[in-house]
Every structure is written in structure tokens, then in C-alpha cells.
Image (spheres, rainbow, N blue to C red):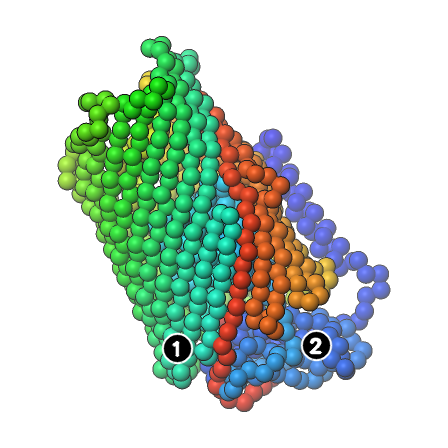
């Protein structure tokens, strides 16, 4: 399809979206006369906005008319019919319920600023209750409320991300945002060393039941680190409740088992939380590779490789955190966490290589191990000042880790005789220090005009020691000798100093503007014990972000944004260590990599109806002139070597649309779709690759009588593209049923994933002047699991009486 054709396709999507908006407004032939109820909910003591409180309007006899949830800044808006006496109810766990009559004037009932106090005793039964919508749009982010999805009782954080808007997971576990794997993943708004080191494996260590929400930011402000060209994903874990209590989540299935326990205690101003997690997971992949080695366009060799690989992941996590509230405006938090994980892999394979010299046929067995233990300490201070939005936050983190990875491969003649063995141990260690300060200063008494400034300093030091032993000199011998040319010790450091400024302005009630600039200075380098010279690199990046927000009506929002992001090479990209676990397919790092810079322009629209229906759509253009791509070459012996290099430019033009609606009080539905045209170019390699990519996902749940809930979700993508090739489609689907009991304090969930297929086939093709390859991979992903969850304990808080203040005062949400 031509570029013009894809522009036309995107235009059709947006026109259809507009028609849908029009249809929403014109469906009813004789609309009822309605009026707007709006207001803002804050804590009576701290004046902090209260998010996700339930707001409901009832007629006499407690008949529900309309309901919603408060936004991040505490605001709410309801559109209700006129004609009867109405009462407004507001409730939130830990706070006293609020009730007031509603008296509209000229089509508007402005409730102003509503202050509610914390409940001083054990909470009574909440009269008006609600459930968070699965998808929400707030400011510059989309939020997937994972805790509202019963399908997340089992599985890992990887399964949670699979359901989030704009996020896709490849068959081999790579996380992508709008089809781009260059992302920054945060944990509770902060950088996480374990996620940065090995995202794919770390996600498998986090039980899905521990995830409360996922925030997706494609145009993050300058406050966020510039790393992650495609955007930022923030995984929010479930927070502790005030009081003494906890929860236990257990799941067991044919492919994975998890346990998650949480205990929290609060005494006055001091609270402590303990979280323990453990997981086991098994995966199996069967692969068949057929690759031609080329010279001058002619085939000079052919490799047929068949591999059956099984991986068993084991992970454990423990976290102890504490919080001390010095007074209503100041608090100190701290904690220590420990991760331990391993992902051993065993494989068996068959190799057949033909060239002009003859035929080389043999079987191959392999064993690879990966072990990591990671410890992190954190100490943070937060202070809110008198004026709305004025805040100071200080963050400090220190972590250290130890790693051990090795492989052993054996090549065996068809007759059964062993003739080659290679073993390579690789040990490493690292230390990370992160210091961050953020300050927000309102420029007016309302907090509508806000100036944010801050800085960050981080330093990482790592050490990697590796060597290789084999019997290449004495084939068939059990005695292995070291290969000095492939042994080394690498010491690596990376230091980043950053500063930013953000200015947020409001013009009237309908226009908002945010301008931000971030400067980052990076120094990195490595020293080698032998063979290779030391290298040093310094670079400076000044990145900008602009966001223009227009509130067209109370239901329609338009956003135009421009963002610059970067991707720095990490130690695994730079480490020249040669991994020859499969001697026919060798990988290594490249110490000469430079950071890549990505620029994106995006126009987005969000529609929210009074009924709760929401629709988010957008178009975007991304450009990158210095992309880091894994380049593969094949030599005259048929051996593939893969190394990352700055060799490509890529561009993306895309559109996305997401919807969340309730067909009835008990039936909810959400769905999303992404489509983009991708262009890859490399003048150095004289290579190019273009493709049209799309992905869709759906999620629906039904609440039945007797506290039973059914859920279905599924996702489909037509594949991915790289400079040298592409993959075929990837899809998965899931069913779940949940039964709650003990007054909804406990529940059992049964989940089935991909029940109608034993395995999933995905094909990958790649081509270059030196080779042409086709790979078929069968992923065995059919699974079932049973989960049990139980919440126990009491919930307590303390505070003052409810207060209400009318007027036009507003509070700005703390970022």
C-alpha cells in the first residue's frame, strides 16, 4: 500500500471517529432537558484532591440517576435530567460520606469546593459504591486500571501490560508502545533498577494481582527522564490501606504459580508495610530456521536448524516500607526491597549445513543460566505548602546487584559421538545511585499557573568478567582449555546530571498550556583488562516538550503535543562479550554506540459522556535519524553475527483509537486499535524496509447474580518490522470467571488462556546482501490457572468534620 493510501486510511479512521461523536449527540429524537452538576473534592486537612471517589445523584427513595468518579484533581461533572428533587452523595474509603441537595441555576449546579474529613473510626458500610473504569484519560496519560479487571487475579505483570492501551507484547515477551520497543518503564513513578536491567524477566516476577494500574504517557512532561523514545510506562502497585490488615493472593496452573502476601500496620503517624511475592513459570518454544548464506547474490551455503527450548523462571521479591507523617503537610517514606530471580534454559537441536565443501550434520544440546540478586534502598521526603500546588519532593535510591550467567553447548555427531563442547561463565556486579529533587511553585492563588523545576543525578558502575573454555584443539576430549582471546574483564560507568523546568498555564476555563525543557549531560566509559582499548564518551541532550490543551466542551478535549525523547545505549548494548551459546548464531555488544534522539508530534481527542462512555483517538508522527538497530551478517561459513549499531533512520505515521463503555450496569466493554506506517532507511548499509502495522485489543466483563463475574480479553497484531526483516501476526485470548464470597473479602478466579490452540506459530523473515533467512517458531502458550484472594483486617483513619466551601476555587493535581 502506498504512503498516500495509509494517510487516507488514517483519515478515514478520524472521520469515522467524528461521525461517532455526532451520532452520540444525535441518537435521541426528543432529548430530555438536563443540567450540569460539577464540583471538586479535597481533603479537609491537607486540601489535597481526592481522586476516584464515588459521586452519585439519587431521586427520592434512593433511586440512582447518575454516577461517576472524581478526576485526578478531585473534580467531577455529571449531566442529569431535570424535573425531580435530587440528592448528591459522595463517598470514598477512609472518609466520611457527604450528602447535599442539588439546586441548579440556569442549567448549572456548581457545588464548589467540597471538603471531607477522614473517618475517625472503623468504616461503616458504604451506601454508594462504584468501580473504577477500566480505561481513563487524565492529563497527558492514559490509565489502565488493572485492579478493576478480574482477569488479573492470575499471571504476571507481563499479562497485565498486554491488556493496556497502545501496549503490545511480542510472542517472545518484548514490550512495545505503539509498536516501538524503545520505552522507559517506571515502578510507582520512580526508576527501577531491576526493570531497567532485564525488563522481560523482571515483569514475570511481579504477580498480576499486585498491579493496581498502568499509566501510559506518549508525551511526558520535562519532569520525567528523557530516556525512552516511544514514551513512558508507569506500573503502579497496590497501595496499603490505613489501619491493620493485608491480603493474600495465590494462583496455580500448568505453566505458572504465584504467591503474593501483603501486611500493613498503622499506629498514629507511623505505618509499616510488608510485601512478599514469589513466582514460578515455564515456557517452551520450538524453532525451525532455514538460512541461505549469499555472496554476490548467489547461495554459497544453507543452514537448517531445529531447536526445542524450555525455560523455567523462578523469582522472589520482598519489600519492607515505612511512612512517617510529621504533620499534615510533611512526610518521610523509606524502604528496602530484595529481588532474586533465575531463568535457566535447556535446549536440544538438530543442525544441517551444506556448502561447496560438503555436509556438516550434528545434534546440539545447550544449557544457559541466568541468576540475579538485587537489593534497593530508598528514602524520600515530601512537603506540601500552604498554596495549592506548592510542593517539594526529595528522592534518593541506592541499589546493588550481582549477576551470574553462563552457557554450555555440546555438538554431537549423528552417530552419538561427542566432538565439541564449549562452556562460558560470565559474572557481573553493579551499583546504582539516584538523587532527585522536584519543586512546584504556583504563580497565582488558585494554582492554575504553575512553575516546576528540578534536577536529577545518577551514577551506575558495573563490572563484568567473562571467559570461554572449549575443546576445539582436542575434539571429543572432556578436557576443556581456556581461549584467552575471548576472555576479559570490563568495568563500566555511566553518570547522568539533569535539570528541567516546566511551565503550566491556564487561559480562561478552556485553554491550558505546558512548556518544558530538560537538559541531560551523560558521561560513560569502559576499561578492559586486555585486548581492547578503554573508551570514554560524553554527550549533551536538550529536549523539549510542549502540550496545548483545549477543552471544547465539558465532554470534549483536544490536545496537541510535541515531545523530544532519547535512548541511551545500556551496558548490554555496549559490552563486547561474545555469546556463542549457539555457535551458528553469535551475538555481542558494541562499545561505540551513540544515543538516539526521537521527535514526535501528536494530536489527540478525548470524549467522555455523562453515561460513562469514553472515546480516545489520536494521530502522531515520529522521526528518528540515529536509531540503534541490531544488525545481522552471515559469513562464508554460514555463521550469523548480530551486533547493535547506529545505522538507521526510521519514521512512523500512525493513529490510535480506544473506547470504554457500559452496555448495562453489569456489562462493561473496552477496545483499542493502533495503525501505523513505518519506514526504515540505512544509507550506510543501503537497506530499507517499509510496512503497515496494526494491532487491536478488546476486554469485556459481565457481572452476574450471586457475586459471579465473567471476563474475556484478546489481542491481535499483524507483526513487527525491523531494518532487515519482519515477523508475522501475533495473537492471544483469555477467559476468566470469578466468584466472590465472605462479603467480597475473598474470591476464587479460574482463568484459561488460548484454550483452542496447543501452540502458536509465528514466522520471521530477514534479508541482507549476505543472507536470506526464514524462521518458524511455535510458542506453547495454552494454559489454565486457579487463583484465590483474601483481604483481611480493619480500616481506620482520623480527621475533622466535613466542610463545604462554595465558589470557583480549584485545586491543581500534584504530578
Snapshot quadrant of residue 51: bottom right
* Quadrant the N terminus occupies: top right
Q: Is residue 545 above or below residue 320?
A: above
**Residue wearing tag 1:** 271
Measuring 81% from the left and 78% from the top, which residue is drawn there? 83
Q: Residues within 10 Å of mark 1 (few under 14, many from 20)?
A: many
The location of residue 24, given as percent across then percent down, is 74, 57
Nearest the eye: 812 or 186: 186
Measuring 44% from the left and 27% from the top, which residue is drawn there? 306
Query: Outermost residue, left direction?
Result: 530
Disc on the earlier residue, 1 or 2:
2
**Residue wearing tag 2:** 57
User: Which of pointers 1 and 2 indicates the residue nearer the eye?
Assistant: 1
The location of residue 672, given as percent across then percent down, is 61, 50
Q: Is residue 179 above or below residue 385?
A: above
Nearest the eye: 567 or 802: 802
Question: Which secondary structure, mark 2?
Answer: strand
* Quadrant the C terminus occupies: bottom left
Q: How many marks?
A: 2
Amino acid at each position: 500500500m502506498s504512503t498516500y493510501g495509509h494517510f487516507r486510511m488514517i483519515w478515514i479512521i478520524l472521520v469515522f471517529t467524528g461521525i461517532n461523536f455526532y451520532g452520540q449527540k444525535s441518537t435521541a429524537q426528543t432529548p430530555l432537558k438536563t443540567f450540569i452538576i460539577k464540583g471538586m473534592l479535597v481533603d479537609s486537612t491537607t486540601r489535597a484532591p481526592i481522586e476516584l471517589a464515588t459521586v452519585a445523584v439519587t431521586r427520592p427513595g434512593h433511586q440512582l440517576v447518575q454516577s461517576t468518579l472524581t478526576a485526578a484533581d478531585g473534580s467531577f461533572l455529571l449531566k442529569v435530567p431535570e424535573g425531580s428533587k435530587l440528592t448528591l452523595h459522595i463517598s470514598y474509603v477512609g472518609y466520611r460520606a457527604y450528602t447535599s441537595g442539588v439546586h441548579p441555576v440556569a442549567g448549572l449546579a456548581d457545588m464548589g469546593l467540597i471538603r471531607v474529613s477522614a473517618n475517625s473510626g472503623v468504616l461503616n458500610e458504604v451506601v454508594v459504591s462504584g468501580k473504577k473504569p477500566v480505561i481513563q484519560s487524565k492529563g497527558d496519560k492514559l490509565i489502565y486500571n488493572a485492579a478493576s479487571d478480574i482477569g488479573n487475579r492470575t499471571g504476571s505483570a507481563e499479562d497485565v501490560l498486554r491488556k493496556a492501551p497502545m501496549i503490545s507484547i511480542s510472542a517472545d515477551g518484548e514490550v512495545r508502545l505503539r509498536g516501538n520497543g524503545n520505552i522507559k518503564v517506571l515502578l510507582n513513578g520512580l526508576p527501577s533498577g531491576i526493570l531497567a536491567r532485564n525488563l522481560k524477566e523482571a515483569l514475570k516476577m511481579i504477580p498480576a494481582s499486585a498491579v493496581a494500574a498502568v499509566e501510559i504517557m506518549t508525551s511526558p512532561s520535562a519532569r520525567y527522564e528523557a530516556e525512552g523514545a516511544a514514551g513512558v510506562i508507569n506500573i503502579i502497585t497496590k497501595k496499603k490501606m490505613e489501619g491493620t490488615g493485608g491480603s493474600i493472593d495465590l494462583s496455580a496452573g500448568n505453566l505458572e504459580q504465584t504467591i503474593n502476601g501483603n501486611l500493613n500496620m498503622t499506629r498514629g503517624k507511623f505505618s509499616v508495610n510488608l510485601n512478599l511475592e514469589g513466582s514460578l513459570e515455564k515456557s517452551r518454544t520450538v524453532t525451525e530456521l532455514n538460512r541461505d548464506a549469499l555472496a554476490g547474490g548467489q547461495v554459497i551455503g544453507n543452514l537448517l536448524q531445529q531447536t526445542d527450548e524450555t525455560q523455567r523462571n523462578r523469582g522472589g521479591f520482598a519489600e519492607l516500607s515505612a511512612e512517617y507523617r510529621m504533620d499534615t503537610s510533611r512526610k518521610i517514606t523509606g524502604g528496602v526491597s530484595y529481588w532474586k530471580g533465575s531463568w535457566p534454559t535447556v535446549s536440544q537441536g538438530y543442525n544441517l549445513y551444506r556448502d561447496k565443501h560438503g555436509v556438516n550434520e550434528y545434534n546440539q544440546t545447550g544449557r544457559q543460566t541466568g541468576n540475579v540478586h538485587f537489593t534497593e534502598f530508598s528514602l524520600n521526603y515530601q512537603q506540601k505548602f500552604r498554596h495549592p500546588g506548592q510542593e517539594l519532593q526529595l528522592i534518593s535510591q541506592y541499589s546493588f546487584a550481582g549477576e551470574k550467567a553462563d552457557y554450555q553447548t555440546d555438538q554431537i555427531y549423528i552417530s552419538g559421538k561427542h566432538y565439541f563442547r564449549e562452556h562460558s561463565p560470565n559474572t557481573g556486579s553493579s551499583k546504582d545511585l539516584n538523587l532527585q529533587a522536584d519543586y512546584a511553585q504556583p504563580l497565582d492563588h488558585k494554582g492554575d499557573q504553575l512553575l516546576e523545576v528540578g534536577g536529577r543525578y545518577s551514577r551506575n558502575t558495573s563490572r563484568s568478567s567473562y571467559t570461554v573454555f572449549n575443546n576445539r584443539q582436542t575434539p571429543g576430549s572432556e578436557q576443556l582449555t581456556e581461549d584467552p582471546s575471548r576472555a576479559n574483564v570490563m568495568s563500566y560507568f555511566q553518570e547522568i546530571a539533569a535539570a528541567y523546568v516546566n511551565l503550566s498555564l491556564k487561559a480562561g476555563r478552556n485553554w491550558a498550556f505546558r512548556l518544558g525543557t530538560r537538559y541531560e549531560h551523560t558521561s560513560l566509559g569502559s576499561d578492559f583488562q586486555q585486548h581492547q582499548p578503554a573508551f570514554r564518551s560524553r554527550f549533551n541532550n536538550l529536549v523539549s516538550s510542549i502540550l496545548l490543551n483545549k477543552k471544547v466542551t465539558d465532554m470534549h478535549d483536544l490536545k496537541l503535543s510535541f515531545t523530544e525523547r532519547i535512548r541511551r545505549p545500556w551496558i548490554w548494548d555496549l559490552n563486547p562479550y561474545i555469546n556463542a551459546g549457539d555457535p551458528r548464531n553469535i551475538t555481542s555488544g558494541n562499545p561505540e554506540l551513540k544515543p538516539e534522539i526521537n521527535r514526535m508530534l501528536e494530536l489527540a481527542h478525548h470524549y467522555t459522556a455523562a453515561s460513562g462512555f469514553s472515546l480516545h483517538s489520536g494521530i502522531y508522527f515520529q522521526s528518528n535519524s540515529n536509531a540503534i538497530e541490531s544488525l545481522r551478517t552471515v559469513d562464508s561459513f554460514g555463521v550469523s553475527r548480530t551486533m547493535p549499531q547506529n545505522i538507521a533512520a526510521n519514521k512512523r505515521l500512525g493513529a490510535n483509537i480506544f473506547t470504554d463503555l457500559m452496555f448495562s450496569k453489569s456489562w462493561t466493554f473496552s477496545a483499542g486499535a493502533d495503525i501505523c506506517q513505518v519506514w526504515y532507511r540505512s544509507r550506510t548499509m543501503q537497506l530499507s524496509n517499509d510496512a503497515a502495522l496494526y494491532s487491536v485489543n478488546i476486554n469485556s466483563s459481565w457481572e452476574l447474580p450471586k457475586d459471579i463475574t465473567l471476563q474475556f480479553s484478546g489481542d491481535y497484531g499483524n507483526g513487527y518490522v525491523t531494518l532487515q526483516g519482519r515477523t508475522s501476526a501475533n495473537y492471544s485470548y483469555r477467559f476468566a470467571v470469578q466468584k466472590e464470597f465472605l462479603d467480597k473479602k475473598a474470591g476464587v478466579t479460574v482463568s484459561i488462556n488460548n484454550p483452542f490452540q496447543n501452540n502458536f506459530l509465528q514466522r520471521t523473515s530477514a534479508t541482507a546482501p549476505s543472507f536470506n533467512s526464514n524462521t518458524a517458531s511455535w510458542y506453547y502458550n495454552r494454559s489454565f490457572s486457579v487463583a484465590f484472594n483474601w483481604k483481611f483486617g480493619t480500616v481506620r483513619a482520623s480527621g475533622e468534620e466535613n466542610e463545604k466551601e462554595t465558589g470557583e476555587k480549584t485545586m491543581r493535581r500534584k504530578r
